[in-house]
Amino acid sequence: MAERIKRKRCAIYTRKSTEEGLEKDFNSLDAQREACAAYILSQASEGWEAVSELYDDGGWSGGNMERPALKQLLNDVTAGKVDIIVVYKVDRLTRALADFAKIVEILDENEASFVSVTQAFNTTTSMGRLTLNVLLSFAQFEREVTGERIRDKVAASKKKGMWMGGPVPLGYRVEDRKLLFEPSEVKSVRYIFNRYIELKSVPKMVDDLAAKDFRTRKRVMSNGRVLGGIHIGTGALTLMLQNPIYVGKIRHRGELYDGKHDSIISQELFDRVQSIFSDNRRDKSLGKKSRNPSLLTGMITDPDGRPMSPTQSKKQSRTYRYYSTRFKPLEDKVAAWHLPAGDLEQTVIKAVANHLSCELIWESEDGTLNNDRIDQYWKTAKNLPCLSIVEQRKFLLKCQTKVQVEAKAVKISLNLKEHPDPINISVDAKLVSKGSELRLAVAPDNGSAKHEPDPVLLRLIANAFAARDYLIDGKSSPIISGYSQRHLRKLARLSFLAPDIIKAIIQGSHPAHLTGRRFLRAGTIPLDWESQRTMFGFE
């Protein structure tokens, strides 16, 4: 009895790097598919049969795996819908060796393979993999060399002032690879530059153009999609106002070259616009234009060494400011830090002021004290806490200040141009919970934990004595009205705390980690005071 041939489902994958020619009745994708279908038909005796699904990536590069049809194909392989991938040539599947390794791994995990019609390869054997790796290495080499050649050609052409493609700037049109004036738009370009000189603000400029119903140029893509025709945004307007193309220049990799096109505006007007941008950036860095400027923006990093940015949150009518971890794209945002801005800023200002006004001393080259160099910083540092936040930030930027928040300290680094060595300041401090707030507890110079009394702890102590009076003597108090008997008994336990513990809570000298929640969630509180001190960290 003849052995039954196992059915093998074959998926044809086709790809073309550009969209050119895809509109034809018979294009490159059709030719690839036809050749693959014929090959599958020739293997019908081996149980091969083509699946009906089409996996076509027209206009997608083989340099990466971000292709819709390829993703769908690999998903179908994982789902067990495909046994063999059939391609016209290996480079249709991928041109990158690393991507090829990923694809082969997926195929091996799902007991699938792929076949090239024009290259007899089989990924199920080690020799087949070796041959494919060699072939793909050359394909990747060819792609990289081609890319280098194109980049060199673009660089050489731009140095000669030639237009090398891309979105055509407003005010120009392209003819024979040369930028020419678009008369209907030149007037708009000149208006935008001159109007910005008056308003000195991109957002105001955006509103001004929107009020005049100014819209971007419409562009029709090869697939019929229409882009543009909308009100210009702040990002696009900023790029336009900083584009040297309008003064007859071509920019390439940070360098400017004389272009072969005519300028729309004068160099003087362009320079005035750039000067306003420069002034605005400087004012923004100092916080002059911010309603609530943040002192340490751009200077502070979290306990994990990541940069932090100012954020705000509102609870009812109260606004809370924080410095929060700034994440990179796609970075896991679980381990975020949110540090109280006011406490941090106050800690840094006090530490810098105290250090520079008291300890900033250095000598000149001949060994004598250089008073002129001291006075410049000493006078400012002495009055630093009394200055506005803009002036404080200006001083910190001048000192090239860096702030590193650690688990139990805030470390500040200053780099003064006039001082030979970096100045490092360390302040003992740690984050603690104060009711529903997160606060920064700073230890004084003697090292003892001294901070503002916690209002939650103060209220707990008052409630504790009121609860004890009610349970023992029946004296009621409005501050404990509505509490259950169970909660009253839990509160009453706190009235038996050692006198020095209660005194520390009232004065704010208790351990920084001690919170109201810690008290209420504690188990049986011992009656002897020594054990209480040990339990709540007073030793």
Image (cartoon, helix red, strand yellow):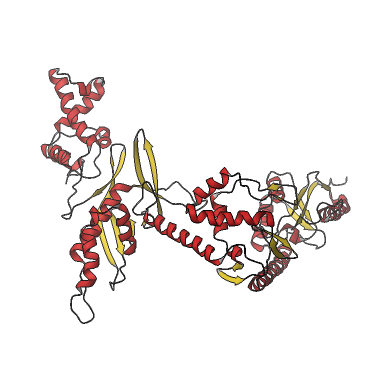
Q: Nearer the viewer, residue 398 or 76?
A: 398
Residue lying furthest left in this view?
A: 499
Residue 103 point in image, percent of width and height: 67, 55
Q: Quadrant of residue 190?
A: bottom right
Residue at 48%, 49% (x, y): give it: 332
Residue 137 point in image, percent of width and height: 69, 68
Q: Can residue 301 be seen in this view?
A: no
Q: Is residue 310 left or right of residue 48?
A: left
Q: Which of 479 and 197 is in front in this view?
A: 197
Q: Is residue 349 left or right of residue 159?
A: left
537 over 121 or under it: above or below: above
Q: In this view, does 434 lie to the left or right of 153?
A: left
Q: In which quarter of the image is residue 363?
A: bottom left
Q: Quadrant of the N terminus?
A: top right
Q: Can residue 210 be seen in this view?
A: yes
310 over 437 or under it: above or below: below
Residue 467 point in image, percent of width and height: 18, 24
Residue at 18%, 75% (x, y): give it: 369
